[in-house]
């Protein structure tokens, strides 16, 4: 198991504006973001943890990863020929959640929320790049509990079992409803692939701010046939 604390990342106005889908022509938003970055920068301490696990005991729609049983037809198909995977948890850090803003300032709150998102995804980029370099992997894909109906959010509990006490290690707590605190946290399993896989390819939901790839009905049909 390896734990990363205070992952080095850059944080710029342009990054945040891109996530906000706002150009520098919006001087009010730009000034708000700049001010928030100055406030947030001392508290930017993203963290991540991962474990190297081996896959075994594969059944029709379940498999064992690191001694923990998971049930998911899509995960089972994706890991059919995979022996080694990398369960992980990454977070923007509790420090950013401790920044207090005026309750009625919706724009500032939204901008701060976007800064947390940028920090989280920068940490994920760092972790993925580290795994590729360390284990000589040309390409990685990831699956996350709750991202698809075939791998429900309740299996967050099994994933967190792999790490023991994630809250003590990187400050991420799993609630009774299987959500994570801080909310800008991500858990999942990285695995090597020849063709990039995104859960979004199997999800037909049209309106989704987190979509990373277009819905691919042909691919979704192939997964249904395999299962």
Image (cartoon, grey):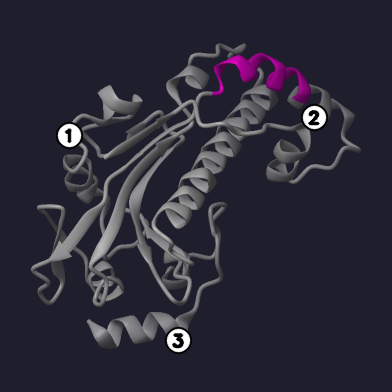
The answer to whether residue 179 is seen in the rendering is no
Q: Secondary structure at mark 1?
A: loop
Q: Nearer the viewer, residue 152 or 186?
A: 186
Real-space Cα separation, disc 1 to disc 3, in angstroms: 39 Å
Residue carrying label 3: 218
Q: Which residues are magenta?
A: 34-44
Q: Secondary structure at mark 2?
A: helix
The answer to whether residue 173 is seen in the rendering is yes
Residue carrying label 2: 29
Indicate left or right for 217 with 108 as reference: left
Quarter of the image where the N terminus is located? top left
Q: Nearer the viewer, residue 10 or 145?
A: 10
Indicate left or right for 117 with 166 as reference: right
Looking at the image, tell me whether mark 2 or mark 3 is earlier in sequence order: 2
Residue at 68% x, 44% y: name it: 19
Q: Residue 193 at what x, y percent from top left?
A: 40, 71
Which residue extends farthest right? 25
Looking at the image, tell me whether mark 2 or mark 1 is earlier in sequence order: 2
Residue at 28% x, 88% y: name it: 225
Real-space Cα separation, disc 2 to disc 1, in angstroms: 41 Å
Q: Nearer the viewer, residue 81 or 14?
A: 81
- Magenta region, mostly helix, strand or loop? helix
Please tell me whether residue 43 belongs to the stretch shown in magenta: yes
**How crowded is the residue under tag 1: few (<14 C-alpha within 10 Å), some, or many (20+)?**
few
Q: Secondary structure at mark 3?
A: helix
Residue carrying label 1: 164
Looking at the image, tell me whether mark 1 or mark 3 is earlier in sequence order: 1
Q: Residue 158 at what x, y percent from top left?
A: 17, 47
Indicate left or right for 50 with 6 as reference: left
Q: Residue 27 at what x, y percent from top left?
A: 89, 29
């Amino acid at each position: 198991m390896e734990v990363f604390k205070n992952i080095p990342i850059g944080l710029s106005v342009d990054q945040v504006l891109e996530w906000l889908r706002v150009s520098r022509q919006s001087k009010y938003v730009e000034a708000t973001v700049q001010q928030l970055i100055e406030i947030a920068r001392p508290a930017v301490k993203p963290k991540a943890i991962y474990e190297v696990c081996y896959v075994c005991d594969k059944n029709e729609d379940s498999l064992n990863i690191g001694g923990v049983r998971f049930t998911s037809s899509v995960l089972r198909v994706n890991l059919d020929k995979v022996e080694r995977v990398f369960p992980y948890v990454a977070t923007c850090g509790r420090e950013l959640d401790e920044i207090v803003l005026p309750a009625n300032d919706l724009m500032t709150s939204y901008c701060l929320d976007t800064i947390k998102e940028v920090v989280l995804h920068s940490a994920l980029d760092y972790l993925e790049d580290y795994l590729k370099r360390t284990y000589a992997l040309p390409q990685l894909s990831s699956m996350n509990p709750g991202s698809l109906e075939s791998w429900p959010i309740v299996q967050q509990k099994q994933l967190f079992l792999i790490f023991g006490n994630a809250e003590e290690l990187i400050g991420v707590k799993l609630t009774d409803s299987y959500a994570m605190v801080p909310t800008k946290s991500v858990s999942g399993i990285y695995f090597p692939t020849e063709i990039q896989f995104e859960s979004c390819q199997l999800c037909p939901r049209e309106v989704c701010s987190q979509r990373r790839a277009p819905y691919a009905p042909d691919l979704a049909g192939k997964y249904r046939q395999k299962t």
